[in-house]
Structures are given as structure tokens and as C-alpha cells.
Image (tube, coloured by chain):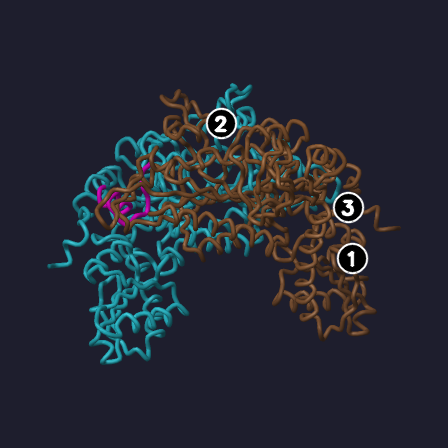
Chain colours: A cyan, B brown
């Protein structure tokens, strides 16, 4: 009996990446579908990932002096309409509550697609003088955007996220906050999720509805498609003017506040899957893995094996999140199951190992086996977890480097877009017309104007006008 | 200049308890009103309370092997209607989404008032054999119930809560789970929030829509009104039959599962206010207080005072949640402000204290001042925080004891209800007619049939029929 039969195989990622993704979210028990179209059920293993993400981000937010609050999930229609660009951007995807109990409401309520308008209304009531600033708020909640086609984590009608909302006395402070939070996101993505991030600014076309400037971190999936992984918006005083949010400065002069907002969502779980996963299932970076080490006794019916395995589990619990599986399933079944779940390290211990005072450690990412002395168990596991975290990041970075191309003419741009999938760097004149032409002819959207600029050519890839602006283009989830 | 002028006084609780409550939630900056009728904004200080409550409860749930999940916030109308009693109970207070974007939906979606139906649908798909049981799930989210009259924390259209949902192989296991979680709630209320809890069962009339039995913890507010502070429901196999949730047992026989659900909400913050608060504002038990100790420098312009105060704050931060206020506001203003916020211990340190190597500790609850040596700072603060926690519980218990009455006839019941406010213990025959008559004539609802029974009389207080069942009656929030 081979181990292959224990778990039904998932689709090969090189054959059908989309199906491979769907197989993983189901087989690793991350989500389930519900009878509510476009909404997902986040199962315990998926939610444990989100809890670890929340915990780390919440810590970072508090370290940078932000406080959590909770706003209502409903927004009256008239309130949503106060900022013109904002409502135009969101109206097509709003879910509307029209009845409460048996009565029709006098005014429809939007289920929040995002909460700028509620925070603005609150700021307009609670900001009086410069002493009240800055307001540095965050909220954890779910939001709803009516989507036609949905995929678990990547695009769902309802999703979980955090949304930061801040108000500042000056434009400089608001800009510093916007960039600070983009950096928090980028560091989180790189250090915690082991996903390389490109930091940059969105074009006018792609910016948030109502923002003066939107900054983004863009990451590249294994298949070469891009994923916007977090955004940070500087609103200037646009919302402040629409909602009349003023404060009295030190010279007793009335001034409008300057605002920001920033958000990261359950989408990043999609990124985790598509950046690190392989044909055996999930591969989780140790920092975010709900279980970092799984202990599996071999020939567990033999005397002393389960006892020794439990002893190891207890030792490891002091340095890592560890579980043990002493169920009567075959070891091969267990190997497959925890590979599917992406648990970073497997510890195998059987009668022969006990005899030799050793243990077998197996990395999920490379499947490399090492035999280590029981006396050096803790230090080896700690080292291995660190190595896996680093090595996953490097592998993802290599994949991105391999799949990042350059184009200096439309011909080249179209050819790369036809033949390859990845980031394409190309110069752009900042005209909407060229951005739209690139989308139409090459099927590419601008991902961002990266902070790290390169002068690949003197002229716009589309119209030939002189420019010194380079853009990352790509096909995006 | 007296300290009284610094903070606008709140209404005297003995003059107008309802207004006193409203004043506190506003002045302690727990909530703000929004333009969404019946919904509240939970401000940073209020949310910090909820975060501490969440953290402790979540720990307790995980200790008892529950896993967190997330279900959609929408429930299709047809799904909500599957269990007859359940939909009848909730339909009058459901908010309905009828439009998504610009289109009318084929089927209206309820914004979840509670999630039994969603969990049932999920269980029906994921429970196959006895190996899949028990399912021990919890979810943190907000729910919506359309309310006509609302009050912050106590009754709002949207509120935050956790809802546990479990499925078991046997009726015995389901009953054990129901009682286990009731005990988790009762211990949490008593140990963490310092609020005495009466554990008991709801009458048929007051039980949850769709439950076989509802258990509750009831607490008494300072004004003698009762507050239902947490409930735990045993569903038997009623939902399992409505949703066809079956498993194959060890003898290959198909069996229905037995289910429970249990919930605690932001209401308990209302209880915290109304059990412990006084005419100077909030009084918080140390275990739930976001800030346990506030350091206030006296004559802080004098050399060395702020430095010494900061040194103390750093020392205290190793043993408690501590803050320091070095703003240029007068100490009297600061005293009032942090009394309003209910911070358990105030540390005052001025030039004279520094000279004498001492510090002044002031308890929020009793306002008792003690002067302690700086050498014994940590041990005195630790001791004081424990004392406050215990003493708040005892004070609340005394208040409840004082306001708990007994009645053995309808005359007596009506008289007590007219003249006093509190719990009234009285015998009841378990007939709905008597329960309704007591409500109509004495204005009292049954709070619970307590686990700790007393034989106050031989007969029902209303009809005179023989009974050995005692009930707590009261007026409730």
C-alpha cells in the first residue's frame, strides 16, 4: 500500500493553476462554500491563519500608537453620497438594506463597503482643536462589495479586513502616516508571510475612490499574476471639506484636517497559497503557521513509542506551536494530510530512532530529511524553522526576479504579455490614454509606479513621449 | 480653585439612573452616537474593554477545545425559515438586504441576527461519521436585530458578540457542553468582571427560539434591575432534524447530532457600568481595566518630578497596565478625568514624596489613600489591585443580597414589586398562565429557575397549586 492513495491528489499547478488553487482551499480545509452566493465560510484552519495575521498586524498598529474602535456596519445612503468620487466608486457594488423587521426603511442603508464616511462623521463631531489630533484609529471587521465572479480569499462578496483611519493637523503628517503604514504592510508581508513586496504608488486611474494618492504593495504569485496585497491612501483634505472636519490651530485659526486610510484583507491568505504552495498542498511560512511542528510516531503500537513522542511534543511546545497525531491512521496518511496543510516541520519518531537516541526531521518546503540527536532537538527545530522562513522568502523572490521582464516598445510589451506571465517594467508618460491603450492592446494593467525607479528608456513605451517614470505592468487577481 | 469645576458633573445615580448611565457612556468616552439609528460607535476606551473581554473569553474557549471560524453575515430567507420556531422568533427583527449594486436580488438576504442556520447548513455538509464529532466552534462577529428603542451596550440594533455552535454525538454530551459553557460564562462574570451571577434555566416562555432548553446567568444592577448576561442553549436534535445533520455511528447506524449554542455580548459592558459605577463615573475591576494604574506627577514643573514619575511608571509597567499623564493640565483635572474613566489605582508623586522616598496610592473604588515606601511600590500595587478586584465583587454581592426579596403570595409579590426594585424569589407551578399573570399584575418577568433551589413555600405564588420550583422574578434591561 503506497501513501499516494491516502489523500486524493490535487490538480497539478502547472496544468491548471486555478483548479489547483480551488483544490487546496478545499482539501486543506481553509474554506467551505455556503448557500450565500459569493460568501465563504472560513473554517478553523483558515481562520487560525487569519488570527495569526491579525495578532501580528494588531501588534504593529499598537506599536505605532493606533487605537481600535468599532463603527456601525450600516451607512445611510445620504452619508455615503457626501464625497462625490467616493460614492461614484462604490455605489455599483453596494448591498442595500431596505427593510427592518416588517417595515420599509425611510432611507436605504448600505452595508459598509468601507467606512471612510462613518469615520469622517465621527471626526467632525470629536475633533475640536489641535489638542484632539492626530486621531489614529483602526477597526477589524467585515465589509461587503457585490461581486459578479468570486473566488475564496481573492474576491468574495463579504471579506474580513482591517481599515485604519487617521486625521492629522498637517498635510506632511498625513503623508508621513500614509508611508509609515505602507511600510508596516511591506515589512509584514516580507518578514511574516515571506512574500516579497514591491512598494509604489497607484496611477490616477487605479487609485482609491476619493483619495489624493494611493500607495500599494504588489506581490507576484507563482503563476506570474500580480496581487495587490495592501493599500494606504492619502486623502488630503478632500473628505475633511466634504464632511466639514475642522480644528482650531494654535493661532486660533480654523483648519481642515488631513486624512489617511489603509487596509489589508483576507486576500493575503490567497497570496500565501499562491506564492508558497506546491502540488502536495499548502506550504506555510513558520511565523504564520497555526501548527509549526507535527510529531508523528512510527510503529506507534510498539512499546514506548507514543510515550516518547508525547515527551518530544511537550519539549517542543516550549519553543514552537506543536501538535502530535496518535490517531490509528497510517503514518503515510498522516504525512500526506499535514503536507496538504503545509505544516513546516514533521518530526518522525519510531522504535529504531528511540534506540539510537535520534529523531527524523522533515521540512515541508524541500522535503529534506535530517536525522538529529534527541539531545539537540530544540536547537535543531528552532534553526530549521528560521531556515524555512528565510528560504521561502528567497524562493519567492527568485520566482519574482525570473518572472520580471522589461519592455521598451509596444511590440515588445505585447509580445511578452502574450508569451509570458509576470511583471513587466516599462516607461510611461502618465497619460491615461496610454494606460488605457496598454490595457486594451496588451491586456495589462498598471500595478504601480514603484518607489525604486529605473530609467529603462527615455520615452513612454506607448506614445514615445519623453518621460522618466517607470511602471510595473501585469495581469492581476 | 476646587477640583469640582474641571469636569462637568454627571447626573446623580439616585436621582436619575438612566441619565446617569447615559452620562457615563458619553463622558468616559465609551461610545458615540452615529447617524445610523440604533447603532453605536464604540470608541477606543470602550473597545479596549471589549478587547480585554474577548481576550479572556477566547482563552477560555480555546482551553475547552473550541475553534474559531467565520460564517457569512447574510442568510438567505429560505435558509432562515428552515426551523419553524427559530424563524418565528427572529423574523420580526431582521434587517433585509434586497438589492446588490443596482439590481434587485432574486431572494432577500437577512443580515444575521444569529447564525444557527448557517452553522447547521455547514454541519450537514461536514459531519459524516462519529469521527467528525464533536464540532466545537465559536465565532466573533456583529449581529443585527431591528430594535425600536435602543440604549448603548444594553440594546442596540447592531451589537458585537461571540456565538458558540457545537454538534455532538449524544444528548448527554450536548447537555454537558451547554452546562460547561454556562459555567465558563459565570466564572468569567464573577472572576473577571467582579459581577455575581445567578445560574439557572429560562422558562419555556423565555427560552431561545428553537431551543429545547436555555440556561442563563442573571446579574443585578445597582438600581435593582436585572440583566441577562449570557445564555447557553441546548437544541437537542431539533435543528439536526430540520437541517438533516446525521452521522454514522460505530454500529453503522445513522443518527441525528445534538447541538448547542451560547453567546455573550457587548451588553456585559453595560453591566460593568451599572454594577460598579458611582457618581464620579466608571469604576473598573482591575482585571478588565485597559489601564490599571495612572501615574500623576504633582507640581511637575519642579525639578526631578517628571523624571521620578516616569521611573515609577516604568517600574510599574512590569507588573500592571500603567500610564502616566505629564500633560500641562492641573492635577485636579487629571484626578477627575481618570476617576470618570474608572482607572483602579492612582499614583501621586510630588517633590515632598520624593524627599520622603514615598508615594501616594489612591483607590478609585473607596477613594482610600495610602502612603507607601517607594521600596515597596510593586508589592503594594499588586496587593491593592487584588483587593480592589475582590472588594468590588463583594460590594456587588452585598447589593444583590440586600435587593433580593421573597414573596409567598401575589399580594406580597405585587407590594414588593411596587415598593422595591430587585430580585424577588417566589414559587411557581410552571404554568404559562401564572407567568403571564405575574407579568401583567406585578410587572415582573421570570429571570430564571435557579440551579440553587429553595423551598420557600409549598405552593405557586399565583395559583396556589402545589410545586417545588422556585423562580427569580424581576424587572429587566
Q: Could you tell me which chain the residue with mark 2 belongs to?
A: B
Q: Badge 2 is on which residue?
A: B95
In the rendered image, the vertical position of residue A151 relative to residue B94, given as above or below: below
Q: In this view, does A334 lie above or below A27?
A: below
Q: Which chain carries label 1?
A: B
Spatial CA distance of label 1 from label 3 is 13 Å
Left/right of residue B363 with respect to residue A310 in the rendered view: right
Dot 2, how many residues are within 10 Å of its Cα: few (below 14), some (14-19), or many (20+)? many
**Upstream in sequence: badge 2 or badge 1:** 2
Percent position of residue A311, x then y: 34, 72
Q: Name above or below for residue B253 compared with residue A304.
A: above
Chain for disc number 3 = B
Which residue does the image show at 17% across and 49% down from the upper left?
A: A9
Question: Would residue A73 be seen by someone viewing this image from the given angle?
Answer: yes
Q: How far apart are marks 3 and 2 (CA)?
A: 38 Å
What's the mark number on residue B202? Answer: none
> Mark 3 — residue?
B279
> Label 1 crowding class (10 Å Cα cut-off): few <14, some 14-19, many 20+?
few
Residue B36 drawn at (x, y percent): 58, 29
Secondary structure category for the residue under label 1: loop
Q: From the viewer's perspective, is residue B308 above or below residue B397?
A: below
The disc, 3 or 2, on the residue closer to the chain's N-terminal end is 2
Decide if residue B214 is on the left or right side of residue B102.
right
In terms of image quadrants, where is residue B108?
top left
In this rendering, the count of numbered labels is 3
The answer to the question of whether label 3 and label 2 lie on touching residues, with beta carbons closer than 8 A, is: no
Frontmost residue, A63 versus B158: B158
Read off the magenta span: A19-34
With A19 as the anchor, is A68 left or right in this view?
right
Q: Mark 1 sits on what residue?
A: B367
Taking depth in this image into account, of B94 and B423 the one nearest to the observer is B423
Amino acid at each position: 500500500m503506497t501513501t499516494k492513495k491516502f489523500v486524493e491528489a490535487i490538480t497539478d499547478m502547472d496544468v491548471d493553476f486555478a483548479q489547483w488553487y480551488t483544490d487546496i482551499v478545499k482539501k486543506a480545509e481553509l474554506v467551505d462554500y455556503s448557500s450565500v452566493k459569493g460568501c465563504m465560510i472560513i473554517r478553523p484552519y483558515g481562520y487560525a491563519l487569519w488570527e495569526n495575521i491579525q495578532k501580528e498586524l494588531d501588534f504593529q498598529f499598537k506599536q505605532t500608537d493606533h487605537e481600535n474602535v468599532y463603527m456601525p456596519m450600516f451607512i445611510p445612503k445620504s452619508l455615503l453620497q457626501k464625497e462625490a468620487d467616493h460614492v461614484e466608486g462604490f455605489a455599483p457594488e453596494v448591498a442595500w438594506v431596505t427593510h427592518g423587521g416588517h417595515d420599509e426603511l425611510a432611507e436605504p442603508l448600505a452595508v459598509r463597503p468601507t467606512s471612510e464616511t462613518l469615520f469622517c462623521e465621527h471626526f467632525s463631531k470629536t475633533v475640536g482643536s489641535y489638542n484632539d489630533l492626530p486621531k489614529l484609529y483602526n477597526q477589524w471587521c467585515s465589509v461587503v462589495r457585490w461581486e459578479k465572479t468570486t473566488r475564496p480569499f481573492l474576491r468574495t462578496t463579504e471579506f474580513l479586513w482591517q481599515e485604519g483611519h487617521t486625521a492629522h493637523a498637517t498635510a506632511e503628517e498625513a503623508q508621513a502616516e500614509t508611508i509609515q503604514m505602507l511600510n508596516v504592510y511591506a515589512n509584514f508581508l516580507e518578514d511574516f508571510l515571506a512574500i516579497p513586496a514591491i512598494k509604489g504608488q497607484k496611477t490616477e486611474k487605479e487609485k482609491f475612490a476619493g483619495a489624493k494618492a494611493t500607495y500599494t504593495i504588489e506581490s507576484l504569485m507563482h503563476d506570474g499574476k500580480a496581487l495587490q496585497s495592501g493599500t494606504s491612501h492619502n486623502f488630503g483634505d478632500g473628505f475633511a471639506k466634504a464632511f466639514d472636519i475642522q480644528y482650531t490651530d494654535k493661532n486660533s485659526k480654523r483648519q481642515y484636517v488631513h486624512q489617511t486610510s489603509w487596509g489589508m484583507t483576507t486576500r493575503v491568505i490567497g497570496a500565501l497559497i499562491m506564492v508558497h504552495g506546491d502540488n502536495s498542498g499548502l506550504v506555510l511560512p513558520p511565523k504564520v503557521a497555526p501548527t509549526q511542528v507535527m510529531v508523528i510516531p512510527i510503529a506507534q503500537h510498539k512499546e514506548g513509542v507514543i510515550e516518547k513522542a508525547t515527551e518530544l511534543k511537550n519539549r517542543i511546545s516550549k519553543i514552537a506551536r506543536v501538535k502530535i497525531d496518535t490517531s490509528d491512521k497510517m503514518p503515510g496518511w498522516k504525512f500526506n494530510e499535514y503536507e496538504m496543510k503545509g505544516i513546516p516541520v514533521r518530526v518522525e519518531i519510531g522504535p529504531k530512532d528511540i534506540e539510537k537516541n535520534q529523531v527524523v526531521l522533515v521540512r515541508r518546503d524541500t522535503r529534506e530529511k535530517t536525522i538529529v540527536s534527541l539531545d539537540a532537538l530544540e536547537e535543531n527545530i528552532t534553526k530549521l524553522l528560521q531556515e524555512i522562513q528565510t528560504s521561502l522568502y528567497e524562493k519567492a523572490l527568485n520566482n519574482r526576479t525570473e518572472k520580471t521582464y522589461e519592455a521598451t516598445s509596444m511590440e515588445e510589451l505585447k509580445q511578452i504579455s502574450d508569451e509570458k506571465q509576470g511583471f513587466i517594467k516599462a516607461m510611461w508618460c502618465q497619460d491615461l490614454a496610454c494606460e488605457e491603450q496598454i490595457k486594451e492592446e496588451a491586456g495589462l494593467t498598471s500595478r504601480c509606479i514603484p518607489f525604486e525607479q529605473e530609467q529603462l528608456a527615455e520615452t513612454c513605451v506607448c506614445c514615445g513621449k519623453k518621460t522618466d517614470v517607470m511602471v510595473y505592468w501585469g495581469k492581476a487577481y
